[in-house]
Image: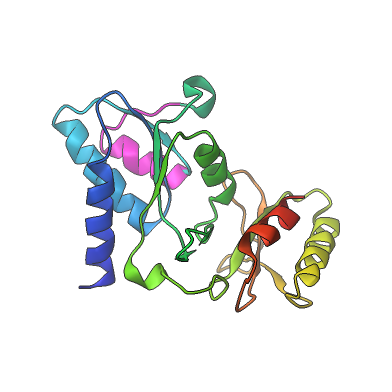
């Protein structure tokens, strides 16, 4: 089975978990897009939901499919969020953020009673870290923040100069929907995913 077919099947299956009247977090990325399209088809058949998108791209797709859109501040609590992942291990630790929607994805997930991660088989790994770990950073004091992040990574034995500022194809620093930058960190292996997450958050 191709990766695209796996993604499509996962997206359709996740969309079937949505019930009438739910507030649904709409993730970002190629796999989440399959779920949004499947939800759009159900909305066209009468399903009543409110979608809270995690990016402008997902919002545009959802609106085009006739999915009503709500603001996170207005809905307060989200019943179910459907989103993809860049890597996931057997303990359900995940790396997300390749689509540069990391901050919005995390805020929507935190507001959700339940989250479903939809992935194709290529995203399963024995140990996180093969995929770059994205870290969204506000531009104010960015270099100072980057130095502190590198120090946190070193404390976990993850090496110096691991952080690389993500750029657009034009060569300028990539801006997220929130106007922030993304640093990508390639570690190879992350033995203590939860500990590293706490250290980076702090």
Magenta residues (range): 56-70
Q: Is residue 60 left or right of residue 15?
A: right
Note whether 81 is above or below 201 in the view shown: above
* Residue ID at (79%, 77%): 160
Rendered-image quadrant of the N terminus: bottom left
Residue 58 forms part of the magenta stretch: yes
Note whether 31 is above or below 153 in the view shown: above
* Residue ID at (22%, 45%): 38
Q: Residue furthest left?
A: 45
Q: Is residue 147 left or right of residue 153?
A: right
Note whether 30 is above or below 39 in the view shown: below
The rendered magenta stretch, by its main secondary structure, is classed as helix
Residue 118 forms part of the magenta stretch: no
Q: Position of residue 153 (x, y in %)?
A: 75, 68
Q: Position of residue 100 (x, y in %)?
A: 55, 55
* Residue ID at (63%, 66%): 166
Q: How is the image coloured?
A: rainbow
Q: Quadrant of residue 97?
A: bottom right
Q: Residue furthest top?
A: 74
């Amino acid at each position: 089975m191709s990766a695209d077919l796996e993604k499509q099947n996962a997206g359709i299956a996740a969309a079937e978990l949505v019930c009438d009247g739910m507030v649904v977090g709409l993730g970002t990325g190629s796999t989440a897009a399959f779920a949004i399209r499947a939800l759009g088809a159900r909305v066209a058949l009468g399903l009543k939901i409110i979608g809270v998108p995690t990016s402008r791209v997902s919002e545009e797709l959802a609106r085009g499919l006739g999915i009503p859109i709500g603001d996170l501040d207005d809905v307060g609590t989200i019943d179910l969020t459907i989103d993809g992942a860049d890597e996931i291990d057997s303990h359900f630790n995940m790396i997300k953020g390749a689509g540069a929607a990391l901050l919005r994805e995390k805020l929507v997930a935190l507001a959700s009673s339940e989250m479903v991660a939809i992935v194709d088989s290529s995203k399963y790994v024995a140990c996180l870290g093969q995929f770059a770990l994205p870290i969204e950073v506000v531009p104010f004091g960015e270099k100072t923040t980057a130095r502190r992040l590198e120090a946190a990574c070193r404390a976990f034995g993850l090496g110096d100069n691991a952080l690389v500022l993500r750029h657009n194809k034009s060569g300028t620093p990539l801006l997220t929907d929130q106007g922030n930058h993304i640093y990508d960190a390639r570690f190879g292996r992350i033995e203590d995913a939860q500990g590293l997450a706490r250290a980076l958050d702090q």
